[in-house]
Amino acid sequence: MPIVVDIDVMLARRKMSVGELADRIGITPANLAVLKNGRAKAVRFTTLAALCEVLKCQPGDLLRWETEDTAGE
């Protein structure tokens, strides 16, 4: 999929665990794992807003588009 999710990058920058982030945004660690591993089919704007608020970042810091040729490299 050409949309790449960089939640791991922001978690590392903020020195935060997946469990802590999940608790703070109000979703299960399993659902956060689906999102951060790029397996989600959609993300609610409320979830995206909560991620940005907790991680103190912009949506573009978490999601980026790549062409099909470069996705997965």
Image: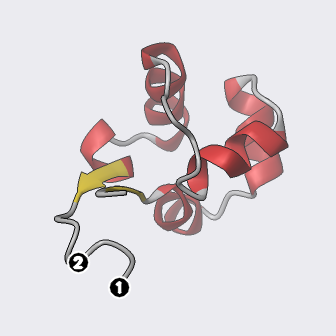
Q: Secondary structure at mark 1?
A: loop
- Asked if marks 2 and 1 touch (Cβ < 8 Å), the reply is yes
Q: Secondary structure at mark 2?
A: loop
Q: Position of residue 46 (x, y in %)?
A: 50, 14
- The label number, if any, that marks residue 37 in the structure image: none
Q: Residue at x 49, y 19 (%)?
A: 44
The vertical placement of 46 against 4, above or below, is: above
The vertical placement of 31 against 70, above or below, is: above
Which residue is outermost to the bottom?
Answer: 73
Q: Amino acid at mark 1?
A: Glu
Residue 70 shown left or right of residue 19 in the figure? left
Q: Amino acid at mark 2?
A: Thr
Q: Residue at x 42, y 40 (%)?
A: 56
Work out which quarter of the rendered image holds the C terminus and state it. Answer: bottom left
In this view of the protein, which residue sits in the foreground, 39 or 50? 39
In this view of the protein, which residue sits in the foreground, 23 or 14? 23
Q: Which residue is mark 1?
A: 73
The vertical placement of 49 against 5, above or below, is: above
Residue 1 shown left or right of residue 54 in the figure? left
Q: Position of residue 11 (x, y in %)?
A: 58, 59
Q: Which residue is mark 2?
A: 70
Q: Position of residue 66 (x, y in %)?
A: 21, 63
Give neighbour class at mark 2: few <14, some 14-19, many 20+ (Cα, 10 Å).
few
